[in-house]
Amino acid sequence: MTIEQTKQKSLGNWESITTEIRPSNSKNPDGTLKPFYLTRAFTFLPHDKFELTVTNFADPYGKMPLAKMEIKGHTEWKGEHLITAGAQKIDFIADEKYAVTPLLQGFADVLNKYTQGFNEWKVGETQNILGKAFAPFGLATGQIFKEYD
């Protein structure tokens, strides 16, 4: 398929069917990566746009939600992947919206301790972090989050 055909076939919604486990940036005492639990709801839109909602959990069963992130932006298609025939390289750039909502008091407390330039973080209240320094996610002022896939 051409890139345009791939884009057309990719339009639509995708959601996690259960809690996913991913490696985090934090390490256990033995040096292994700590697990990171989440669900994703992704929409690929026309004109190289996307929307993504990620909900993070404190447990592998998705019973204790920590935070919700809402991300919107555009994609950059980089061409065919060299390792897998037919696969495409694509960058997801969160340049329209990057918002965080704490869903657990302990997480709100961490955000209040380690972030500056925001209103007080409260459970259920969303704040925009787009282009702002946000140490918990390793973002500097003016930096736009980008995922390389």
Image (cartoon, helix red, strand yellow):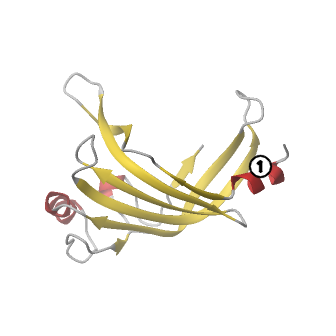
| Residue 141, placed above or below residue 63 | below
Q: Position of residue 78 (x, y in %)?
A: 73, 47
**Closest to the observer: 72 or 13?**
13
Residue 93 appears in the picture as rendered: yes
Residue drawn at 32 percent across, 73 percent down: 126
Q: Quadrant of the N terminus?
A: top right
Residue occupying the far top of the picture? 30
Would residue 16 be found to the left or right of residue 133 on screen? Answer: right
Type of amino acid at the residue the image marks with label 1: Thr
The residue depicted at 21 percent of the width and 71 percent of the height is: 121
| Residue 143 x, y percent position in the rendering | 48, 61
Q: Quadrant of residue 11?
A: bottom right
Decide which of 54, 121 is in the foreground and name it: 54
Regarding mark 1 in the picture, which secondary structure is present there? helix
Label 1: which residue?
6
Query: Looking at the image, which residue is at 58% across and 65% down?
Result: 73
Q: Nearer the viewer, residue 26 or 50?
A: 50
